[in-house]
Image: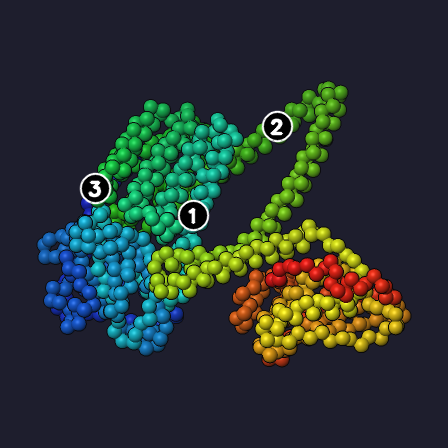
Amino acid sequence: MKFAVCLLMFFIVLCSTPSPARATLLAMNAVHEQRDLQRWQPREDGIVSLNGPWEFYWNRLLGPDDFTDGSPRDAFTVSIPAQWNSYTIGEQTLSNEGYATYRMIFALSGEAAAQPLGIYFNNVASAYRFWINGELMNGNGTVGTDVTSMIPRSYPKLYFFVPRAGDNEIVVQVSNFAQRTGGIWESVDMGDADQVATLYRNRVMIWTFIAGSLLLMAVFSVFLYLFRKKELAALWFGLICLAICIRSSLLGESFAYVLFPGLSWEWGVKLEYISEIVTILGVAAFVNKQYPQDAIPRVFPVFGAALAGFGAFVLLTPAKVYTQYMVPYILLLLLPVFLYVMFAYIRAALRGRTGSRTNIIGFLGFFASVIHEILYYTGFVSFGGLLYFGLLFFLITQLLNLSLMFTRAVTRSESLSIELNQVIESQEETIRQRTSSLQQLNRKLEEGNRELGRIENVRSTLLAEAYHDLSTPITAIKGFSKAMMTAVIPEEEAPVYAKRIYERSVLLEKLIDSVVELIQLKTGEIRFEFAVVPLLPFLRQLSHRYEAEASDRRIALRWEEPVLPLPPSGEITVSMDPFRFERVFANLVSNAVKYTPADGVIRIWMEFRPNAGTDDGCVVIHVTDSGIGIPESELMHIFKRRYRSPGIQQAKSGSGLGLAICTEIIARHRGEIGVSSKIGEGSDFFITLPANVRDAESGNARMAEGGEYGREHSVD
């Protein structure tokens, strides 16, 4: 009880007394000040925070044109991040409602200005627009001088610009009439364009990972409840995970606003508060169901009614109103619920309930992250976002709890086994019957386990193949789409990027087909229909068939008739699947056409290497082009999956799986595929297959004309 009272007093003092670190005095800018970054090297020194000095103009919206004759006289010097109510002009503390202009001059060296830079705006409350060196870079929301003329919009955004050597100017207009927080209250970071883009991408990945993990846990918990309706604790646990998932998508990098552009800032903040209310309610209900003997059932309806009332208040009032009640909300709703949960866990631990100590450790970590989040949102600490890691820590302790329960179940099973052996010793007939039943059951379990292992192995392989091969085009499509939605790409360039999205979609379709085909080849799901094929007529027919594809590119495709040491009636035959072999042939010809310039030549020719003293041997089929060639260092890699030559631009149009598929098909023919090449002189792809010499048959005329193997197919 003393602990609860002390904690309550701490919260009251924390939420009512401002920290000395928050009181930031403004100084009149009598002399022009600027940030000297001439020694800063973006790529070597990393990202810098533009924390000051900033010129500050309260209740004035100024643009770059207003500074052509120098800074106005009423400028003040401030640093960021800070809320407006932490600034004091004279003896008067500013309000978080209003509008203002920030301006910074920073100097760069010629070397630093020779490369594009990125600037990363975190949350700015609650609308802003800015210029860099006089160029408008848009911003977020609509800046206005009153509540009717501004549109709030607050989430992190990334911008790129080309700096200039010497002085660079940033002018930022900010307005807030929508919530209790106002101004640039989180950092503004600048650095090399690639480094800032990587920072943004990593943050998005972290928040996506957190939201995805919570969503998976929510789905798992719901299914657990559906399979066992008595587990109401699992249902409440899933509701907690879902609510935190929604909240995490609205905070951090706020990717919910990107996924749902129609989501307004007002409703986003409402969802943020409602999800937190649902989380608190779910935690209380979860503990009640987890330890019903140690909880106080009559307390939960009180919490439920109070939280529902505050939720209705949030839904019916604008953010400007209900965000002002953060302190009462923390003291009267959030804190009592967490104290109640801690009370239930401590009571369960004192009574020796299973897993209660583990729950206390996990909940203390979660509670510490909640305290830190409160300190962050009340301005006492400079960074936040630990709430979700605290929740994940709590969930991990739940998994440890399950492991403990499993261990105890195994121990109990061992003791029961000993008792069973004692019973078996006294009843021999029962022993034989039960032993026989157990052996049969054990065999079934082993068979089932092996089958499950095989299924799991196939599933893991398929998932890994699909994810690795499909993630790149999907990421490109998402990146272009996001850039268009967030207005990073100007409207006049939108058709170009729309075309790129379409091209990536076509590539994705080809890639899916290629991945499926390659997996089927590897797992043996594709059946080959082998037939003894006279090779010369077949190759001659294939060469003529693909002449049109080469001539469209002004490339000559020539079949060179070989001179072979064969008897007059002898012919070379190969056991092959003609359709699959044509798949390989078409791929090699297509690649040769792709990398051969106009007026080039592609030669199709063959050589026979007989074995000494026998009628068999091997044939080597060549597809030789006069194209750009392949570097010698890359020859050993081009038949690998997903490999593309980094120095060849045309390689980006394919899936990167064509030669890997060709390798699998030729391997099923007991053959090999290889290549020799020189830069600027062309490449020679060759296929080696086992062959036989036999007497020619009249029935092969149909093969010479194409026969049943002349059907169309796609080429990677």
Question: Circle 1 sits on which residue?
Answer: 210
Q: Is residue 700 left or right of residue 482?
A: right
Residue drawn at x 50%, y 33% is 224
Q: Is residue 618 above or below residue 460?
A: below
User: What separation in Å lies between label 3 and label 2 (alpha carbons)?
Assistant: 62 Å
Q: Quadrant of the N terminus?
A: top left
Between tags 3 and 2, which lies in front?
Answer: 3
Task: Where is residue 459? Give x, y as percent.
Answer: 60, 46
Gap between marks 1 and 3, in whole Å?
Answer: 30 Å
- Using the rendered view, name the quadrant where residue 55 is placed: bottom left
Residue 217 locus on image (x, y percent): 46, 40
Task: Tell me the amino acid under the disc marked 2.
Answer: Ser
Residue type at mark 3 is Val
For mark 3, what is the residue? 321
- Viewer-nearest of labels 1 and 3? 3
Which quarter of the rendering shows the C terminus?
A: bottom right
Q: Tell which circle, 3 or 2, labels the residue nearer the N-terminal end.
A: 3
Q: State the SS at label 1.
A: helix
* 57 vs 687, nearest the viewer: 687
Disc 2 marks which residue?
A: 415
Q: Earlier in the sequence, mark 2 or mark 1?
A: 1
Residue at x-position 39% and y-position 70%: 44
Residue shown at 42% from the left, 52% from the top: 206
Q: Quadrant of residue 367?
A: top left
Q: Are marks 1 and 3 in contact (CB under 8 Å)?
A: no
